[in-house]
Image (spheres, rainbow, N blue to C red):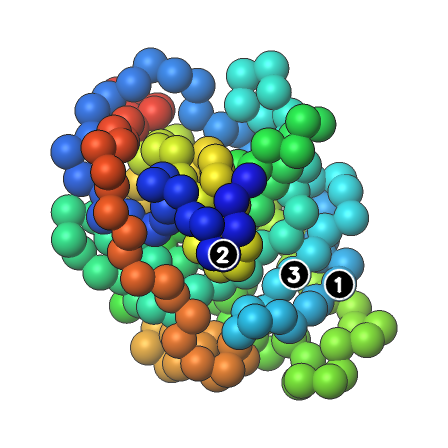
Amino acid sequence: MTTNGDMGSGQSPIDITDWRESQAQAPRFAYASRANRVERTQGFVMFHFDGGSELLLGEERYRLLQLHWHTPAEHTVDGDEFAAEVHFVHVNERDELLVVGTVYQLGEPDVGLQQIIDGTPAVGEEEGVTLSLAAAEHVPESDGYYHYVGSLTAAPFSEPVQWYVGRSVRTIAQRQAEQLQALAGGPNARALQDRNGRTTVCVGCGR
Ligand SMILES: [Zn+2]
């Protein structure tokens, strides 16, 4: 693990480009639970899960810890910027991190996201709030994922993190992006990081 003052050379986010197809396994979602706790920390609204939602990567099982949104998005694709990005943060039995991301472009409102925006408690009122956030409603809509090895994009910027960014793009209304940003207290996307020779593959993209 690296710390804030000693970052490695494999940081996130990156511009996703020059990827090649890979026959490696794509993640499969076994999300069956709802968030049971909301937390505000360092400019984020984190929705925590206490179990019941897993991601399967071949034989490997990763437990969903929390999800959160960034506005604007952190990853770019061939230089294209997006309005927002959701991150699903997972860990396996060996404390190895895996994050699934999905980017949103401006367009039709996301109905499920609006329920979360409307249901997120005000600052200081998080205690005892019952959330209706079902993780399964926000996963990428296709099987294809851009995969590379990076880091957490907020402190402590830990490496390595197995990243899977959905190839499908969801839509969000401008107003929703503004509301998400207001809930987080402002923009919370980290700047793009050097790729430093890292390769990106696309898994599940040949089907
Ligand atoms: Zn994030």
The residue carrying pointer 2 sits among few (fewer than 14), some (14 to 19) or many (20 or more) residues within 10 Å by Cα, namely: few
User: Taking 206 as reference, is 186 left or right?
Assistant: right
Give the crowd class for mark 1: few <14, some 14-19, many >=20 residues within 10 Å: some
Q: CA distance from mark 3 to mark 2?
A: 23 Å
Sequence-wise, which precedes: disc 3 or disc 1? 1
**Could you tell me which residue is drawn at 54 percent across and 23 percent down?**
57
Q: Nearer the viewer, mark 3 or mark 2?
A: 2
Is 38 on the left-hand or right-hand side of 194? right
SS category of the residue bearing label 3: strand
- Label 1 element class: strand
Q: Amino acid at mark 2?
A: Asn
- Numbered tag placed on residue 4 in the rendering: 2
* Amino acid beneath label 3: Phe
| Direction front: furthest residue | 5
Q: Quadrant of the C terminus?
A: top left
Image-based side of 73 in relation to 163, left or right = left
Quarter of image, res 117: bottom right
Residue 87 versus residue 173: which sits nearer the camera? 87
Residue 160 placed where, x, y %?
48, 36
Confirm or deny contact between disc 3 and disc 1 (CB under 8 A): yes
Give above or below for 14 relative to 4.
above
**Left or right position of 37 against 120:** right
Provide the residue designation for mark 3. Answer: 47
Q: Nearer the viewer, mark 2 or mark 1?
A: 2
| Kind of residue at badge 1 | Arg
Tell me, yes or no, if residue 100 can be seen here: no
- The label number, if any, that marks residue 37 in the structure image: 1
Residue 183 sits above or below residue 53 on the image: below
Q: Residue furthest right?
A: 128
Q: Residue at x 75, y 83 (%)?
A: 125
For label 3, count other residues whose C-alpha is less than 10 Å away and answer few (under 14), some (14-19) or many (20+): many
